[in-house]
Image: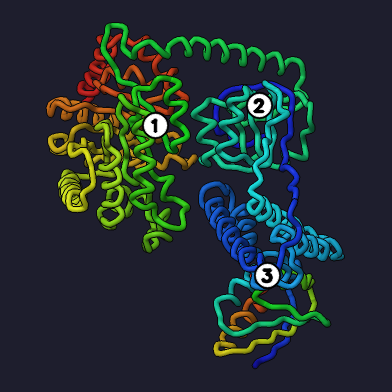
Amino acid sequence: MLRKTVEITNKLGMHARPATMIVKIATRFRSEFKIIKDNMEINGKSIMGVMTLAAEYGSKLELLVDGVDEEHLLNEISELFISKFGEE
Amino acid sequence: MKGISVSNGVAIGRVQIVSKPKLEISKKAIEHHEIEPEIERFEENLQQVLGDIDHLIENIAHSKDDKDILSTHKMILQDPEFIKKIKKLINNELLSLEMAIKIHFTDIVEIFNNMENDYFAQRSSDYEDVAYRLLSQVLQQKTDFLENVAENTILIMENISPSLVTKVFAKNIGGLCTEKGSKNSHSSIIARSMNLPMIVNIPDLLKNVKNGDLIIVDGNTGDLIISAKEELLLKYNGILETEILEKEHLQKLIDIPSETRDGKRIKLMSNIEIPQEMKQVLSVKSEGVGLFRTEFMFIGQTKLPSENEQYEVYREIAEGCYPEDLTIRTIDVGGDKLSQLLNIEHEINPNLGCRGIRISLRHDEVFKTQIKAIYRANIKGNIKVMFPMISSVGEIHKVRQIMQECETELKRDDQDFYPNLKIGAMIEIPSAAITSDMIAKECDFLSIGTNDLVQYTLAVDRDNSSVEEYYQPSSQAVLRLIRMTVRNAHKAKIKVAICGEMASEKKYIELLIGLGIDEFSVSPGRLLMVKNEILNVNFKDAESLDERIFCALEEVE
């Protein structure tokens, strides 16, 4: 199991489009994927979960991956955050 | 306001907004033994809705935004947590599927509505839409949207289904406007073939109109005018009156045979894209169908249509046409449209790529399925088949060979079929027109597709407005190719039809008759207008008009 904390750096926050991107990538992998924000833990493969996080600009998220391809999953998801989901 | 005009004509009337009916849930709880069937029902309905959304993405959604929204809807329905939750509600709480869906989505929408950030909160609409879509599927609720709609009103909707367009027409509603939709959706196609004024894709339409507003729908330009000044209203009333008079005049032509003033018969047929258009084909007494596009069975589908599915469609239309002929065009799409079904590689330039007959010859199993279905449907012998994107006679030879194989296989499988299937080549590539003497010898008829012929001859994309001035259907180059094709066909004693848009444009009809075209195939909505033109043409004059054009040219040379 791997953990990593990421920060949301795009101005609009994690709205529908970034949320869709995260889920699209996550569902390609077999590992379990959880996102924790404050006291809320959700399934990162669930669009409903990711959207209900309502993660705004500047908020910190903890990514939790567990499974055979966890490393690749974590890398790809972190990359999304770094690239600001292709916005700005 | 302005939208995309999909069907010409003017309408003036009072606004009537038709919105989604309320969904009523009657069965709320289930017994223990119903759990399993209820979960099965969930899975079946879910697959159905996902399929519907795929269809919308491929065929109806107009903009990238619409497609993105629909993809999000798909993702919401495929969400593992959502699926888990519904099953849990059915299993643990003994709720009916309907109730489980309602409760789940009500909770989610509540969460969104309580979000402080408006930008996030507005996503609740996605969940409301998805819930509605799924629930109406589960409930199979069929409501009469048009129960309280009066004649000559202007119907305003968010979007409209093809079947509803037919009902709108039957109710004598003046015009139709939708906030969403695209020019080539099935709904738009039907409106067009029925000459029902219709404008689609009008941003914020539902916010800007209210019931009872007097509104002008200008289907010719795509303009929608609310509370027009008296002057403008007068002007439009004038246009409307002229259109009504013209319509009445055209209606009188239905039973008059299509021939020129000096008695040359010009066969007048219809182009159709979907079976629902047959109603209109029959009502204008078209001499059969000169072009049935079969793409609707392939595009946006999750699987290829089976031989039986195609057989049913072809047989029904052929019966509708009888005793007139039905001309079926085999699949004519670019690889881009079928990439999901056939595993086709991405092409940089699909218009010059593997499309039309090239796809059929490459994927001959798909082609054979279609050809066999056509053979079997030809019970009464009134079906003809034609092939798009023929570039040389070699393809006709290959097609003949495949048809032979189909006949052998049908015989082997003891299937009934009518052996003498007449075949024709579409002449829409310059090389086919140039070698039409060779092609004509191998075919029973030719059909000129002017849209592509003009594009390929002049190297102009019809949809690219920056080269609009170069799109000249009556250019010397195109006319020469048409003349060449007609002469070669007549030498081989076969007929030539024309089925592009050029055939239903007033200014070209006399010219085309003069060139010797035997048959016109046009949209059923324009058929009577074309007949009116034909009736006014004198063939002898038309012939000399063409001679003058070509003489002038030869002098210049």
Residue B75, visible in the rendered structure: no
Q: Residue furthest bottom?
A: A1
* Foreground pick, B493 / B456: B493
Mark 3 residue type: Lys
- Secondary structure under badge 2? strand
State if disc 3 and disc 2 touch (CB < 8 Å).
no
Residue under the point 61% across and 64% down: B37
Position of B125 compared to B379: left or right? right
The disc at residue B501 is none
Same-chain check, marks 2 and 3: yes
Q: Secondary structure at mark 3?
A: helix
Q: Crowdedness of circle 2 by 10 Å Cα count: few (<14), some, many (20+)?
A: many
Q: Would residue B58 appear left or right of A4 to someone viewing this image?
A: left
Q: Position of residue B405 (x, y in %)?
A: 17, 52
Residue at 58 percent of width and 33 percent of height: B165
> Few, some or many C-alpha atoms within 10 Å of disc 3 (few <14, some 14-19, many ≥20)?
many
Q: Which one is earlier in the sequence, the residue at label 2 or at label 1?
A: 2
Q: Name the secondary structure under disc 1.
A: strand
Which residue is under mark 2?
B217
**Drawn side of residue B42 relative to residue A42, left or right:** left
Task: Kindly report the distance in space between the C-alpha atoms of the residues bearing marks 2 and 3.
Answer: 48 Å
Give the residue type at disc 1: Asn
Specify the label residue B87 is tagged with. 3
Q: Position of residue B518 (x, y in %)?
A: 26, 22
The subunit letter for the residue under badge 3 reads B
- Percent coordinates x, y for residue A23 in the rendering: 63, 72
Query: Residue B271 has which mark?
Result: 1
Q: Please, which residue is most extreme toward the top here?
A: B262
Do the residues at discs 2 and 1 belong to one chain? yes
Residue drawn 60% across and 35% down?
Answer: B164
Instruction: Give the quarter of the figure containing the C terminus of chain B.
Output: top left
